[in-house]
Amino acid sequence: MDTASPVKFGFVCVQNAGRSQMSAAFAERERDLRELGDTLEILTGGTHPAEHVHEEVITVMQERDIDLSDRTPREVSTDELESCDVVATMGCSTLELDAENVDVRDWALDDPHGQDLDTVREIRDDIEQRVKALFDEFYPDEP
């Protein structure tokens, strides 16, 4: 039995109400599809969390059969992020992690908040592809 620590992906933005929530949800789905179980942990949070997930984000994610309506944005700590193998920021972060072993990637995504649904769909689809590519990089032999 493998006792190595699980890989940990972090998805963070300022409000944790749009891009990082979509990223975490796609990562959770990908983890399930690839049957990775507890070999992968997923963390999401924001530096200044909003009260709720943006309505337009909930709407476009429902189109992918993912329900974000019960999720609550949360604050994420530097310690939590420094425990990750990869932290994807969404293009809005001012994070300065001081951990040598954390691969920080800025995905530079537009903010979906207040955007029309077609624009939010484009952001969602971009996020979905980036999440799949991240899994392909870390788990190339998984289905």
Image (tube, rainbow, N blue to C red):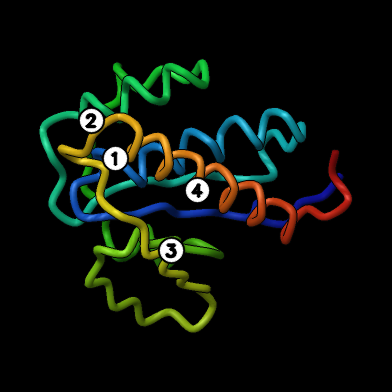
Q: Distance between the residues labelled 4 and 2?
A: 19 Å
Q: Earlier in the sequence, mark 4 or mark 2?
A: 2
Q: Distance between the residues labelled 4 and 3?
A: 10 Å
Q: Please report the residue visible at 68 percent of the width from the left and 51 percent of the height from the top.
A: 135
Name the mark on residue 126: 4
Name the mark on residue 53: 2
Q: Distance between the residues labelled 2 and 3?
A: 20 Å
Label 1 Cα crowd, 10 Å radius (few <14 / some 14-19 / many 20+)? many
Depth check: give the residue in front, 82 or 61.
Answer: 61
Q: Which of marks 1 and 4 is nearer the N terminus?
A: 1
User: What residue is disc 3 on?
Assistant: 107
Q: Which of marks 1 and 3 is nearer the N terminus?
A: 1
User: What residue is disc 1 on?
Assistant: 18
Q: Please report the residue visible at 50 percent of the width from the left and 48 percent of the height from the top.
A: 126
Please state the horizontal and vertical placement of residue 20, each as a whole percent of the image.
36, 46
Label 3 Cα crowd, 10 Å radius (few <14 / some 14-19 / many 20+)? some
Q: Are marks 4 and 2 in contact (CB under 8 Å)?
A: no
